[in-house]
Every structure is written in structure tokens, then in C-alpha cells.
């Protein structure tokens, strides 16, 4: 059931990106990245089993940003892609700030939400800093690699899409897990967690290629 839902979620997210780009052009993709990053930071707390691996639900939404940046670079310009990354970063910081202030309010005796909100929005400062840092670095790395590969192999859209996305994902997963969990988990455990996340995101990255072609050629 989870595998089916996983593919449905992938297709839904990527289809939404293509439709939003057609309706709202680059502005729609910029908004999508902020939306996806904020929502991913909410659903990331839920762990599921996908393809035999333990994964967080945030992986699909986080990975969708790479498709959005690749479309922005391919069809528009890297300035717009970098702007989208910065905006998503700003809105994520605002989201974290608002949720933490909300938790600081003393709940009324009639309140029933504080416990659930605390479980959902409790801030792990170290992991949050690592996540935000690697989000910014990995998405900018994706833009850099995409452009470099495009200059050398201008006709191979699939090549620059997959190579740039996979390398960026691998970099993000391994460095994030090291920064967030060194001293908490053993090194083999950290490598295992990062490898699992990377395998899942490679599958997602391969799935986004048809949608990049669709976005480029659909009139």
C-alpha cells in the first residue's frame, strides 16, 4: 500500500509542478518551492516504509524542488531559480519562528491542540540548522551542475537532469546526516540512514525526468 501511495504522491507532486508552470510560468514554480519546503518540514516527522526502506514523508516534497529548479534553469534563467531557493529559505525560517512562538503561548484549560502541536513542531535546533543549510547548498549545487552539464551536452536533457539531481541529493543526505547525528549515532548507522534516503531520492529523481520533458515541450 505504501509503495502505491508513494508513486501516487510522486506523480501528483510532479504533475502539479508541470500544471503550475503552465498556468503561472516561473512565478508559479517560485511559489511552489516555498510551499513544498514548508509542508515538507511538517510531514517529515512521519516515518514510513517505502521499497523496503525506512523513509520520511518529506522526501518526495523536498525532491520536487529539484524538478522545479531544473525547469526554471532550463526554460527561464538561473536567477529565477536562485530567487526561488532564497524565498523558500526565508519562508521556512518564518514558519519555524511562528510555530515556536505558538508553542510558547500558555494553553487555556480548554485547549486540546498543545500536545499535538508540541509533538509536531518541537524544534531540534541542530537538525534544523543542518537541514536549512544543506537545503540551500544542495539546491544551488543542482543549478550549478545542471548548467555545467548543459554547456557540454546541450541535447541530453535527461543527463543533466539526473546527474545534477542525484549528485545534489547525495551531497545533501550524507552531509546533513553527519551534521545532525554525529555524536548521537555511530558512523555506520549515520551512513546507513543517509544511504537509505539517497536510494529513495534517486528513485524519485529518475521519476521526475519525464515531467521535465513534458514541461519543456508541452504548449
Image (tube, rainbow, N blue to C red):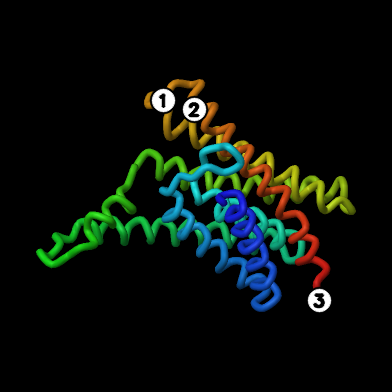
First of labels 3, 1 by sequence position = 1
Tell me if 134 is positioned left or right of 22 in this view: left
Q: Which residue occupies the foreground of this view, 105 or 44?
A: 44
User: How far apart, in angstroms, are the residues tagged by discs 2 and 3?
Assistant: 45 Å
As drawn, the label of residue 160 is: none
User: How far apart, in angstroms, are the residues tagged by discs 3 and 1?
Assistant: 50 Å
Name the residue that disc number 2 marks: 190
Vertical arrangement, residue 78 with respect to residue 132, above or below: below
The outermost residue toward the front is 1
Tell me if 188 is positioned left or right of 210 in this view: left
First of labels 2, 3 by sequence position = 2
Q: Measured from the top left, where is residue 39 in percent x and y?
A: 46, 60
Vertical arrangement, residue 217 with respect to residue 121, above or below: below
Image quarter where the C terminus lies is bottom right
Q: Measured from the top left, where is residue 48 in percent x and y?
A: 49, 45
Q: Residues within 10 Å of mark 2 (few under 14, many from 20)?
A: many
**Disc 2 secondary structure class:** helix
Name the residue that disc number 3 marks: 219
As drawn, the label of residue 185 is: 1
Tell me if 84 is positioned left or right of 183 in this view: right
**Disc 1 secondary structure class:** loop
User: How far apart, in angstroms, are the residues tagged by discs 1 and 2?
Assistant: 6 Å
Quadrant of residue 113 in the image?
bottom left
The residue at the point 73 percent across, 66 percent down is 76
Amino acid at each position: 500500500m505504501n509503495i502505491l501511495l508513494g508513486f501516487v504522491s510522486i506523480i501528483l507532486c510532479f504533475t502539479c509542478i508541470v500544471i503550475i508552470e503552465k498556468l503561472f510560468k516561473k512565478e508559479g514554480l517560485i511559489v511552489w518551492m516555498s510551499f513544498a519546503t514548508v509542508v515538507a518540514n511538517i510531514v517529515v516527522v512521519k516515518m514510513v516504509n517505502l521499497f523496503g526502506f525506512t523513509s520520511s514523508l518529506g522526501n518526495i516534497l523536498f525532491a520536487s524542488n529539484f524538478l522545479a529548479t531544473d525547469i526554471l534553469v532550463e526554460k527561464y534563467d538561473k536567477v529565477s531559480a536562485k530567487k526561488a531557493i532564497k524565498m523558500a529559505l526565508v519562508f521556512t525560517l518564518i514558519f519555524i519562528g511562528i510555530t515556536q512562538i505558538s508553542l510558547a503561548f500558555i494553553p487555556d484549560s480548554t485547549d486540546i491542540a498543545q500536545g499535538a502541536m508540541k509533538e509536531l513542531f518541537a524544534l531540534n535546533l541542530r537538525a534544523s540548522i543542518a537541514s536549512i543549510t544543506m537545503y540551500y547548498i544542495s539546491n544551488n549545487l543542482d543549478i550549478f551542475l545542471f548548467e555545467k552539464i548543459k554547456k557540454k551536452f546541450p541535447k541530453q536533457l535527461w543527463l543533466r537532469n539526473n546527474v545534477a539531481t542525484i549528485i545534489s541529493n547525495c551531497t545533501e543526505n550524507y552531509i546533513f546526516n553527519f551534521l545532525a547525528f554525529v555524536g548521537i549515532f555511530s558512523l555506520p548507522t549515520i551512513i546507513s540512514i543517509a544511504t537509505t534516503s539517497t536510494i529513495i531520492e534517486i528513485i524519485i529523481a529518475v521519476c521526475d525526468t519525464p515531467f521535465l520533458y513534458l514541461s519543456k515541450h508541452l504548449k
